[in-house]
Each structure stands twice: as structure tokens, then as C-alpha cells.
Image (spheres, rainbow, N blue to C red):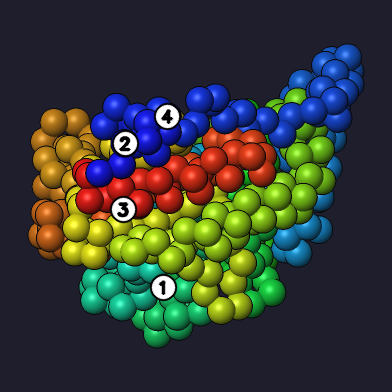
Amino acid sequence: MNFNNKEKLAINGGEKTILKPFQKYNSIGSEELEAAKLVIESGVLSGYLGKWGPNFFGGPKVKEFEKNCEEYFNVKHAITVNSWTSGLVAAVGAIGIEPGDEVIVPPWTMCATATAILHWNAIPVFADIEDQTFCISPESIEKNISKYTKAIISVDIGGHPANTTEINKIAKKYNLKVISDTAQAPGAKDNGKFAGTLTDIGGYSLNYHKHIHTGEGGILVTNDDKLAERMYLIRNHAEAAVGDMKIENLSNMIGHNFRLGEIECSIGIEQLKKLDNLLKTRREAAEKLTQSLKNLKGLTTPIVKMGCTHSYYMYFMKIDENITGVSRDKIFDALIAEGLQGLSKRFANLHLLPLYQKKIAYGTKGFPWTSDLCRREINYQKGICPVAEKLHDSTYIGFEMCLYELSNHDIENMIKVFQKVWDNLNLL
């Protein structure tokens, strides 16, 4: 037995390894402060009008930020919105989803990825995820396609690109649209091209703990002129503009105010300049962790598939208790007791939320599932996504890299925590 109090696990009465909290992530600096100050002094905090005309597309900073994003991500159109949730709603509406249409989506994502489908009275159908990347599984997508399926939403979860090549092949085979939810992976690449730019529509989140942030916000990207036009309209009170614009396709042209303001866009302009360096710093930290943790028995560190780069919004790991001899939950508690912040052992399994288990969305009668719009029984019961469910229940452990500014000392302390716990697995 180990009697050295410094080496004795904190959960068993020893000393904590990490005594000082990690510094919170904050990429806002003097550049953003000056940019916002200039906008405030101009008096033009928003340049939008909710009707067709010179101000339909917003003010100068909105247009500048969008142009900069188009150049950075190498796309024809970048469209700012006031949140990535709004972006998803606009994207689903733009592809022409009809009430009752089915859209395939993974359960391992933020809830808005699926509720954006419900927004248009369409039906989310959950496909399982890959065991390595935790992104949606192309094999499971194909198994869940019905004659009512109209689109797929893939998610570049945690920062690793989904298998867009295979997803696009499936989409072409069944004549489906594909939306990439790349909220967590701006700057990640798949065979030299940016994740989010390889599908009909993609986009990125700009909320406060993302790689680049404007407080709240999002960026939609597409190379399709028609889809871009429809997203511009959905963003800004479409019904008031379609007449003057001579728009003939009026489907889903319902008014919203999804507009991002001038202050946020001025901040975004400065944040975008920092993205490459932010990604470099985070990748270096993640790679150092992986090199030191990959040989711990029963622990699987994040993989990066051939041809891909990772943005490490999250650092996803798995624990195999058949190898460790100790459950994920006990190991998790021991890591936390050592002072390690930012760990999670649960992630979303959206199909198990009350919304889907009870099939209650609009009103109290089960709409849209109980309406004539829903043309078959949709199963959301536990068991439909076994990979995602096993991760959630017993094997997943993750570190929220997005939350912290990690120094080399912090990384070294994290490594010490894991090694200390693994050296004492027999005492848990």
C-alpha cells in the first residue's frame, strides 16, 4: 500500500494534485475593445431594415465580417446570424423542408441540432454515431433512411470532421440535402478543405466558449446561390421582402429576426484574425496530452483520421472497465478529487430527452408526431443508438478544452493527475 500522502489519491485522503483553477478561456483583447468602441461611437449599432432595399443585408461591419469569412473559409457566401441555433433553423428552412419530412440527425450533439428540424414541423430521426470520432455514422444513416427522408444533418462534434465523403455519397444516392453543424469545429479540415464547406450548407457557432466568439452568434456558409438567397431571407423578415425581390418560391419564407449586430461583427472581424493561432495552441496542448496518456491501460485518447485535422473543442476519451478493472464513474470521481476541472462523463443523447420520449413539442397533443404530417411510427426508445448510449452510460469521459487557457504547467498537471490515478487503480 502507498503511504506517501502526496502519492495517495485525494479521493482516499491524499493531497490534491491541482490546487489552482485553470484560467478561463478568453480571446477578447484590446483589438476587440477598440473595434467595438469605434462602432459605439459611430452610433450605428445595426444597419438592418426588415424590408427589401439597401439595408436588407445589414450595416458595414456585418458585410465586412461576412466578406472576411467568405475569404477565410473559401466559400461564395457567408451569412451571419444572431446564434448558431438561428443558423440551423435558417439552414433547414432554406433547403425546402416540408412539414412531416424526415431529417436524419445524430443524438450526440447540442439539442438545437434536432429542434431546428421540429421548428419547421419536420420529424427528427436519430442515427447512431461512430465509436472513434463520435460523429454520425454513415452506416447508421443509411439504415434509417425511409421514403420520407429529405435531408441529413451531420455534426463535426468535439472538433473532428464527420465522414462527409461517405455522407455525401449516401445523399447523392437518395437525393438528399446535407447540412453540416460545424459549431465546434471552425478551422478543422477534411482533405485540405474546411469542415462545414463540403455540404449543401454548413456553419459555425460564435457563442462565448467557441474558438472565436462574439458573445452570441453564428456563421452560415454555402456555395449555392439559391440557398444563400433563402437564408438571407429567412434571417430578415422574408415575407416583407419576397414581393419586391420577385421571389417565386415562397416555401418557408416566414419572418424571423436572426440578425447579428454591428458590435458583434466588429468583434468577429478581430476574432477571425486570431483563429489560426488559437487552433495551433489548442492542438499543441491536445497532442501533448495524447502523447502522455495514450499508453495508460484501458484509456482511449482522441483519434484524428487520415486527411483530417482536429480543432479540439472537446478532448474525447473512453474508458474500458474490462481493462482498468474499475468503472468509468469511479475513475471520474478520482480525477475530479485531484482538482481536475472541466471533466464530463455525460454527453447528450437527444433521443432520450423528455421531448422525444413523450413526443410532446407543440401544444399538449403530441404534434407533429400524432398529426397526419407524421406518416409512420418514429422510435426514440433506448437501444436505437447503442454506441452513443454506451458512451453516455459507461465509457465516455471528456475534457472541455473550450473552457480554459491552458499553460504548459496546466497540461503537465493534468498528465500527473491521470498518471497518479492510473498508478492507484487497484485502490479505487
Nearest the eye: 210 or 37: 210
Circle 3: residue type: Tyr
- Residue picked out by circle 2: 3
| Kind of element beneath mark 1 | loop
| Mark 4–mark 3 CB contact (< 8 Å) | no
Query: What separation in Å lies between label 4 and label 2 (alpha carbons)?
Result: 15 Å
Kind of residue indicated by mark 4: Lys
Q: Is residue 107 left or right of residue 62?
A: left
Which residue corresponds to mark 4?
16
* Residue that label 3 marks: 396
Select label 4 or label 2 by which is in front.
Answer: 2
In front: mark 1 or mark 4? 4
Q: Position of residue 159 (x, y in %)?
A: 53, 56
- Measure the alpha-carbon separation of dots 1 and 4: 53 Å
Residue at 84% over, 35% down:
60
CA gap, disc 1 and disc 3: 32 Å
Q: Residue at x 40, y 46 (%)?
A: 420
The residue type indicated by label 2 comes to Phe
Nearer the observer: mark 1 or 3; the answer is 3
- Look at mark 1 in the image and give the residue it sits on: 176
Report if residue 383 is visible in the image. yes
Quadrant of the drawing holding the C terminus: top left
* Whether residue 241 can be seen here: no
| Secondary element at image label 3 | strand
Q: How many marks are shown on the rendered structure?
A: 4
Q: Position of residue 352 (x, y in %)?
A: 19, 46
Q: Residues within 10 Å of mark 4 (few under 14, many from 20)?
A: many
